[in-house]
Structures are given as C-alpha cells and as structure tokens.
C-alpha cells in the first residue's frame, strides 16, 4: 500500500520536508521548510495540517531553529526558545498536539546539562522521537479501532485523519488501511468537507493511492447515505479531546455525529494520546479557530457568494461526549463515561 | 424591497425572460429563451431553477412553441404538443410542478374548440395565469408561514426557495420578506448548499438585495449554529410532497431536518399546492435526480477531488414526514399526520 509521508526530515536533516497539501489532488509537491517563518506559514496556510502532523512539523522546525542557537549562552538560548515556540504555537489555536510537541521540545532546550552539539543532537532526537512515536501510535490506534470494524465495513468519515494528517498511517483511517491489509473490501464514504475540502482533496486522494474503495459525497448528503442503510460506522479524528470526552474536530463533525445518533450508527473518534487535553474539563473550554470569510465566499478562487455577505466560518466544532460511542487511542478503546486524566 | 423576477414574459411576449442564475452572484444577467431547445437547456443547466419557476418557464416555453403550430391541423398539433411537453418534462425528474404546469398547458392545447389565434391566445393566457397564481400563492404561503414566526425570528434555510425559485416572493423565504416588511429584525442563516451553492450564490444574494440580515455558513456548520442556540426555526422549500407528507427537496434538507429534531427546533416546509403530489403515496416513490460527478469533483471550476474518484451526487433527498413540524402551503398550515389528497 502506497502511503504518503506528510512530514519527515529533508536531506541531511537540514529542513522539514512536507507534502504541500494545498496542491493536492492536482499535484504531489514537496516543500522544504528551513526557517521558523517558513514553518509558521506552512502551518497557517494548511500546507501541512492535521493535529499530529502539525505537532511533528513544529517540533522539527523548533529543533532546526534552536540548533542554530545551540552555541549561544544559556540566557540567550532560553529567550530564543520561548520566541520560537511562541511563534509556532500561535499559528493555530485548536489542536492540542502543537502545544504538546513544543512543550517536549522546550523541556529539552531547557535542560541545563545540554549545550552546543549535544543540545543540537538532543533536539533533533526529540523531534525524531515525536515522529516515530506518532507512527507507532497510528498503527496501535488502527489495531484497536479494527476491533470495532465489522468485516467489509462501510465507513463514513469527515475531513482528513489519514496518513496526510500524521507521521504514519493516520488516526481515523488507520483501521481502514489495516482492514484493507487483511483483505477486507472496506468502503469509505468521504465527506468532501467544506470549506477547504480536506475530504475530497486529501482523504479521497490517499485512499485512492492505497487502492481503498472511496466515494466522495457532499457533506450534507451523509445523512441520506445513512438513511439508505449504507453506513456501518463513522470514524473521525480529533484536534483536541477534553477530559470529559468532548471532542473538537473539523466543523461538520458534530453534524455527522448527530446524524449517526439519529440512525443508530456507532460514532467513533480516533486520536493519539497527544490529542487528549486533561487540563480542559469540557468542550466549552476549547478555543475554536475562526477562519477567513473568503474561504466560504470565494470557493477556490470563484465568487460563490455576494462579496460583502457576512459569513460564520468556524474551523472546528465540538461534538459532546454523549454522541460518541467510543474514543480509540494508542492506549485502547475508551468507552463512556469518559474521564481522561493526566498520565 | 427589491425583488428579482426570476421568470416573466420578454418584450412583445416573444420570449421567456429569465434571470440567468448561473451568473449570480457575480452578475445579474437576463436571458431570453425563444425555443423549446433553449428552454430545455436553461432548465437542465439550472439557468432557471426552483420547482415553481421551472413550472412557469416550461409553461411559457410551451405556449410560445405551440403558438407557432396553432394554424396546423389538429393531429399535427397534438403530436407537436406531446413532443414539446415531453422534451420539457424530461429535463428534470424530481420537481412535480414541471409536470403539473405542462399538464395544464396540454389541456389547453387539446381543447377541440381552440385553433389558430384563439389557441395561441389561450396558451399565453394559461401560462400567464400559472405565473400570476404562483405570485399570489407565494404571498399567501408567506402570510400563513408568518404565523409560525416569533418576532425577530432567527431562521435557518437550505438551498434557495426565494424569489429566484418562483414567480413571486418565494416559498420558504416569503415569510422572511413579510417579517422584514412588518419591521422585524429577522436574521437568516443560509446554508451555502453544496454542490451548486444555491444558498450562498442565490439566497444570500436575494436577501442582501432586500436588505435582510443574512449569514452564510458551510452546510455542515448548521448543526453547530443550532447547538449555540442561535436558530428559532428552519424553513425550506420542496420539489415534491408525497401524499403522506414526505418531502423531496435539495440534498441536505434531510440532514438539516435531523439536526433540527436533535435540537428541538421546529422544521417547516413551504410550498405551493402545485408541489403536492397526492398520486405518490410516500417519499419512497419519488425519483431522485442523480447529477454529474464533476459538480463535486470540480467544484467552482477547480479540481477539488481526484479526477477519477467515484462520487455519489443526488440532487435531492427525502425528508420523512415525521421530521416535519408543519407544511405551509397557500391553503394554510398543515400539521401532522399529513394526508394530502387530490383536490
């Protein structure tokens, strides 16, 4: 199965190499990010997106940038580390993995035993560890989620929680790939996911690359497909999971969960442990990023609404825990009532 | 209030003049349809759309085309009438108004007392009557629906069931316009309505023209807006209403109805009597038009999905009667259990 690598080291570990997801599905283009500014721009413009992938890219960019300051005095380094982490953290507010990955990098940067080459190496090792751990977590998430899949499952998903969103085989799509690997005829209904169409552009593309049967639908058609009896289960990713199991994910996830409940279809969320945020008690505490009105008003460069019409364009929504059948992480299948505490 | 005229006679009653809705919201362009072929193409490509407006345009196109055959012998006229009505009827299968309007025109064409100029005039009068009746029905629908609106109602709607879909002030939007007319601060959340964006392109445009507060949202954000407590009621149009109250309307209507039910928000359908189809017992008997995959794959002219990816693209869905709080027609407010019989 051909699995794209959303984020990895560039040659000689001198850049963060990403697939430029803005160019998909028209072109498979890679981009080398060499500076914090380039990394911030790539995250902000969604050249790299998906909560786990963002965390990995930010960690690598931090390692590269701090590596240059490794010879500097400790106070200078501390100031630089704060500035770099701050810039990367400010790119997108909702995904928790970004802050989690940067906190790990900051801890290494602040280690008083490290300086110079040793610091540079330790930073690179930590970023690589975050990538490798994510890869392993994806596979474990997939193995746990697969226990919830019937044979030849007919799956509905929203946005992209696949290989392109992670360092490995994805979160929500991991079980799909493992099902295909074991020979299932798995079929995925892919919500196109307006406004930025991560479903039709990215999920459909990577499923097709892997030879998995995918059917793209308008987001608002998902409920009809359920009513026809064509969906066995829904599975989506998460940008942040509150302590009580409320889940922030791409806008439209909540609508899908409501439709699944109405039709008695199980609704699963798959995410690495790094997406859990025990410090946030409920979904009400999650900051929802508001994005530009022109994502709606000018769909892909065309004028698709009156130029000055007001738009409400939240990037994410919160699905309350009571609509979620189970949350699958690398640690296993979590059933309600959810209570995620700091580990 | 500036109200666009979606369909009317051209100068000298020699054409069907429509607003070319494919050009909105970028340009307000009018188109004169002079032949059956031009009318069929306009209906098929959605230059004119909306169940009532399609019926009116088809009736007018029929009157123009049959007018030319008015001097012919009766058998020739009968054959032409069947061919013209057949071509117009085949353009779109789901809306019942199209067949209803053509049946009225066929009855006039088949009147053995009419020939020549008298037939031509009678055909034009019947098409004009269909237009005028639709205008009057819109207003009555609005008056009935307004009784269901709280003061300063916050309304959610899907697709376009406004002036652009009818000969008058719309069906679902009629009460919105009447509320604004009486001085309410009414606000409308407009689903953009993928794939063809009749919400963001047309509904938002006509509400803005009329000075009504409109906010465009991605279809999948409607459920979140409801969860925030920002919606008092939903109101949509209908392309066909079965005898039991099942409603065929733009794909996504069903998803909106499911979300409304989940949040305890009333869900209303507004339509003229001509959209009722007592001959179809339930929604299961309604033919759902399937549209081209490229409406999804090439959104707005850009490649928005892999070029060969399978797509499921129904133009409509069926909302079962049990999700509908009331159906509003020109005859009044119908409450469940619905039982629509031939009048």
Image (tube, coloured by chain):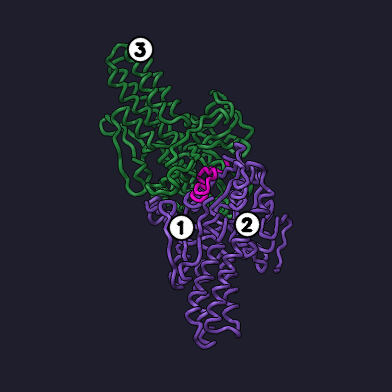
Chain colours: A green, B purple
Task: Choose between A65 and B269: the one closer to the eye.
Answer: B269
Horizontal arrangement in the rendering, residue A293 relative to residue A328 (left or right): left
Q: Is residue A202 above or below residue B104?
A: above
Q: Secondary structure at mark 3?
A: loop
Q: Residues within 10 Å of mark 3 (few under 14, many from 20)?
A: few
Q: Which residues are magenta?
A: B205-224
Q: Does residue B113 appear anywhere in the picture? A: yes
Disc 2 designates what residue?
A: B139
Mark pair 1, 2: CA separation = 22 Å
Location of residue B327 (image quadrant): bottom right
Asked whether the residues under marks 1 and 2 belong to the same chain, the reply is: yes
Residue A173 locus on image (x, y percent): 47, 43
Disc 1 designates what residue?
A: B21
Q: Is residue B162 above or below residue B8?
A: above
Q: Residue at x 50, y 85 (%)?
A: B71
- Check residue A251 for magenta coloring: no
The reply to whether discs 3 and 1 touch (Cβ–Cβ < 8 Å) is no
Disc 3 designates what residue?
A: A113
Chain containing the residue with disc 2: B
């Amino acid at each position: 199965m051909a699995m794209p690598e959303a984020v990895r080291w560039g040659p000689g570990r001198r850049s963060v190499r990403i697939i430029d997801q803005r160019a998909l599905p028209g072109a498979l283009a890679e981009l080398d990010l060499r500076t914090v500014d380039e990394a911030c721009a790539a995250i902000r413009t969604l050249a790299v997106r998906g909560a786990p992938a963002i965390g990995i890219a930010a960690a690598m960019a931090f390692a590269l940038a701090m590596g240059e300051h490794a010879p500097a005095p400790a106070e200078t380094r501390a100031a630089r580390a704060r500035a770099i982490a701050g810039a990367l953290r400010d790119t997108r507010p909702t995904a928790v993995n970004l802050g989690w990955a940067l906190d790990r990098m900051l801890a290494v940067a602040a280690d008083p035993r490290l300086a110079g080459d040793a610091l540079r190496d330790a930073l690179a090792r930590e970023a690589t560890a975050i990538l490798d751990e994510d890869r392993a977590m994806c596979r474990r998430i997939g193995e746990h989620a697969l226990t919830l899949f019937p044979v030849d499952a007919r799956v509905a998903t929203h946005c992209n929680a696949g290989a392109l969103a992670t360092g490995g085989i994805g979160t929500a799509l991991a079980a799909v790939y493992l099902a295909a690997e074991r020979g299932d005829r798995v079929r995925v209904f892919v919500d196109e996911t307006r406004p930025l169409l991560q479903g039709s552009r990215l999920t459909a593309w990577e499923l097709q690359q892997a030879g998995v049967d995918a059917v793209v639908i308008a987001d608002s058609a998902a409920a009809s497909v359920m009513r026809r009896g064509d969906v066995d289960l829904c599975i989506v990713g998460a940008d942040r999971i509150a302590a009580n199991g409320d889940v922030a994910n791409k806008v439209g996830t909540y609508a899908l969960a409501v439709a699944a409940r109405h039709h008695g279809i199980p609704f699963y969320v798959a995410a690495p442990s790094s997406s859990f945020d025990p410090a946030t008690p409920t979904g009400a505490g999650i900051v929802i990023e508001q994005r530009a009105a022109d994502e709606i008003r000018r769909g892909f460069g065309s004028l698709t609404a009156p130029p000055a019409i007001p738009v409400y364009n939240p990037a994410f929504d919160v699905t309350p825990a009571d609509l979620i059948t189970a949350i699958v992480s690398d640690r296993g299948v979590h059933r309600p009532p959810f209570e995620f505490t700091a580990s």
